[in-house]
Amino acid sequence: MNVLVILGHQHPGSFCHAIAETAVQTLQAAGHEVTFHDLYAESFDPILPHDQIPKDAPVDPVVQRHCDEVRFADGYVIVHPNWWAQPPAILKGWIDRVFRQGVAYEFGPGGKIIEHLAGKRALVFTTSNTPRDVELAVFGDPLENLWKTCIFGFCGVRDFRRRNFESIVLSTLEQRRQWLEEVRQITREHFAPR
């Protein structure tokens, strides 16, 4: 499979970076072709200019390359921290600019959604500092809905899984090692031949 891995965390020593590196290594060891982008390291521009919103509008070459990678990937791995129940702005801007109409979806006759990513797989790893029971009781799980329904589901991806690791600030080194082993297992299983 051709798998696109996107990382949205600004600190190279973060646990999100360790998750992304583990996922990439696991995918490569399984024989998958991997395209990896660290959005911060690459200084991806998240600002969507108004004139690039229309479906057939020309986009800059970097965005076009990302669009082509989304279009031709068989699966996606997204890694990011939970910031205010959302991805960091750079990752949200990547979605705005790259999961564009004509690439990930489009509107057909009568406004019917045409899902261009149908049949593909998506795996999202997130991190947070709020203990899970507190987060669910106070906020619910907005990131699950965002990725599963509003983004991937809207574009046709039904084979979806998300795993959140928490609380990062309270975790031990041994716990993080176990979590990375879980990343390996989940990644192997999610992208295993079917």
Image (cartoon, rainbow, N blue to C red):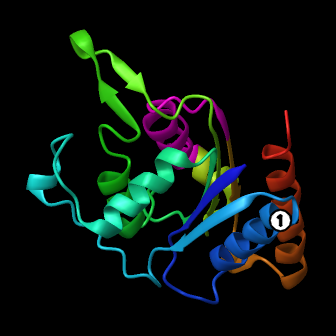
Residue 117 locus on image (x, y percent): 51, 35
Q: Main secondary structure of the magenta part?
A: helix
Compared across the picture, whether 137 is left or right of 69 comes to right
Binning the other alpha carbons within 10 Å of mark 1 as few (below 14), some (14 to 19) or many (20 upward) gives: some
Residue 79 visible, this orientation: no
Compared across the picture, whether 104 is left or right of 153 comes to left
**Looking at the rendering, in which quadrant would you find the C terminus?**
top right
Q: Amino acid at mark 1?
A: Thr
Q: Secondary structure at mark 1?
A: helix
Residue 181 locus on image (x, y percent): 89, 66
From what the image shows, is residue 150 above or below residue 35?
A: above
Residue 60 locus on image (x, y percent): 24, 66
Please tell me in which quadrant of the rendered image residue 59 appears.
bottom left
Front-most of residues 82 and 26: 26
Image point 51% across, 38% down: which residue?
152
From what the image shows, is residue 92 above or below residue 174?
A: above
Magenta residue span: 137-160
Say which residue label 1 marks: 26
Residue 159 visible, this orientation: yes
Front-most of residues 91 and 68: 68
Image point 48% across, 82% down: which residue?
10
